[in-house]
Image: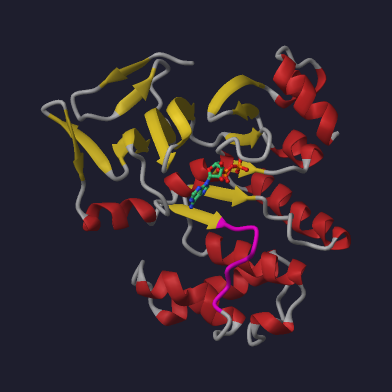
Amino acid sequence: MPTTEQTHTGALRLDDGDVPAIRFDKVVKRFGDNVVLDQLDFTVRQGDRVTLIGPSGSGKTTILRLVMTLEEADDGYILIDGRPLTHESRDGKRVELKEKHKNEMRKRIGMVFQQFNLFPNMTVLENIIEAPVHVLRQSRAQAVARAHELLGMVGLPDKADAHPTQLSGGQQQRVAIARALAMDPEILLLDEVTSALDPEVVGEVLGILRDIAKNTDVTMLIVTHEMQFARDVSNRVLMFDGGRIVEEGSPEQIFTDPQERRTKDFLSAVL
Ligand code: ADP
């Protein structure tokens, strides 16, 4: 773990001067008696592509949902670009931040889900422009122009007027990727984005994500069972078990020379 220091502006900086894109500081998350994350610390640098691996139920999706503010931590802090996401520390107390602040922070983050989560009653174009127009207050013309550009990028230039139900799973997921990118996020969260897809379309979705990783500097936090994809795209892999990081390293290290028994067992079960 890199060392950090608190600057006079309150932002946390890494020892090389960069403000981390995401920082978890002693984050605790419980569901009832189930302690899913137990004082979890980790840092994602700007432009990092970090893949979270580990057995089902180890807390990976919960981490993404916390960053997306779909869940709230019970204790600890999550910082995005050095700024607290939902809570800050004041006089040693954990204080909830205002909704306006949370909304500002959410704008920086895009998420693509396993189940696409497109709005079924809207066309593809309307799905993509919804947040840019209503949240970023872009003009409709600007949002539409960008949506067409993104549809071209994900290989669906002629689907703007289609409804999600008229599209295959792979096509819907490509629309969901375009929709996330339309917000021009600094951080892209990918939660098992190929798990609900037929095997023959997994490759096309992963290909698009590989291109995005190659052609942009968006920070990515990825949960996937596609180990080859994790290897191709990430620069760091974190192995989770029981809500804790048991091992971390480059994809090369983790996939070819894992040190921990739990990492070895997990990889031999999925590879
Ligand atoms: P992973 O992504 O590694 O499979 P999850 O983050 O989905 O793990 O889940 C971690 C644990 O939290 C599991 O035990 C799961 O049952 C529990 N959990 C997740 N979401 C909820 C929820 N909304 N209510 C209750 N328990 C939950």
Q: Which residues are magenta?
A: 112-119
- For image coordinates 75% across by 58% down, the residue present is 205
Q: Is residue 152 left or right of residue 31?
A: right
Q: Position of residue 155 (x, y in %)?
A: 74, 68
Judging depth in this view, the residue of 215 and 248 nearest the camera is 248
Left or right of residue 146: residue 88: left
- Determine the main secondary structure of the stretch shown in magenta: loop
In the drawing, does residue 270 fall left or right of residue 263? right
Q: Which residue in the rendered view is the most extreme toward the right?
A: 200
Which image quadrant is residue 90 in? top left
Q: Quadrant of ligand 1?
A: top right
Image coords of residue 172 (percent x, y): 69, 71
Residue 45 location, x and y as percent?
Answer: 49, 30
Q: Is residue 117 magenta?
A: yes
Residue 230 x/y as whole percent: 73, 37
Number of numbered discs visible in the structure rendering:
0
Rendered residue at 38%/78% (across/down) = 139
Q: Is residue 218 visible from the viewing direction of this image?
A: no
Q: Is residue 156 above or below residue 22?
A: below
Quadrant assignment, res 150: bottom right
Asked if residue 142 is positioned above or below residue 123 in the image, the reply reads: above
Q: Nearer the viewer, residue 150 or 198?
A: 198
